[in-house]
Amino acid sequence: VIPCFWIYRDVGQSIVLKSGSNNPYGMWIETYASKEFSDATDLVIEILNDIAVKSPPGQLALMTKAFKTSVMHEWHFWDDAYR
């Protein structure tokens, strides 16, 4: 799920800079742009990086594959919504 957290944070932080106060998605934007969400995301990234450093090469390869697959799913989610 970390790609979801990471991408939602980045999208929220990007959108918050451009959205107006009457944006119907304001609560969503504020949630994912918030410091609390960013801090939680950073913590999960740090934990997973620590696990990755300690993982054997085969496990690291599986983690990398899962991460890339999840990123692709997130990209398709956003791209499909955009199109």
Image: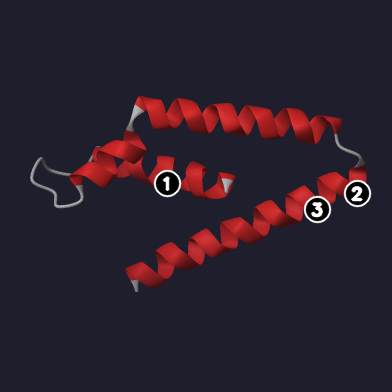
Q: Disc 1, disc 2: CB below 8 Å?
A: no
Counting the numbered discs, the total is 3
Three-letter amino acid code of the residue under disc 2: Gly
Question: Image quadrant of residue 53?
Answer: top right
Mark 2: give few (<14), some (14-19) or many (20+) Cα within 10 Å: few
What is the secondary structure assignment of the residue under circle 1?
helix
Q: CA distance from mark 3 to mark 1?
A: 23 Å
The disc placed on residue 8 is 1
Mark 3: give few (<14), some (14-19) or many (20+) Cα within 10 Å: few
Q: Disc 2, disc 3: CB below 8 Å?
A: yes
What is the secondary structure assignment of the residue under circle 2?
helix
Three-letter amino acid code of the residue under disc 1: Tyr
What is the secondary structure assignment of the residue under circle 3?
helix
**On the image, numbered disc 3 is attached to which residue?**
62
Residue that lies at the very extreme toward the left in this rendered image: 22
Three-letter amino acid code of the residue under disc 3: Leu
Is residue 6 shown above or below 70?
A: above
Q: Quadrant of the C terminus?
A: bottom left
Task: Give residue 73's position: percent from left, percent from top.
Answer: 55, 64
**On the image, numbered disc 2 is attached to which residue?**
58
Q: Is residue 40 left or right of residue 50?
A: left
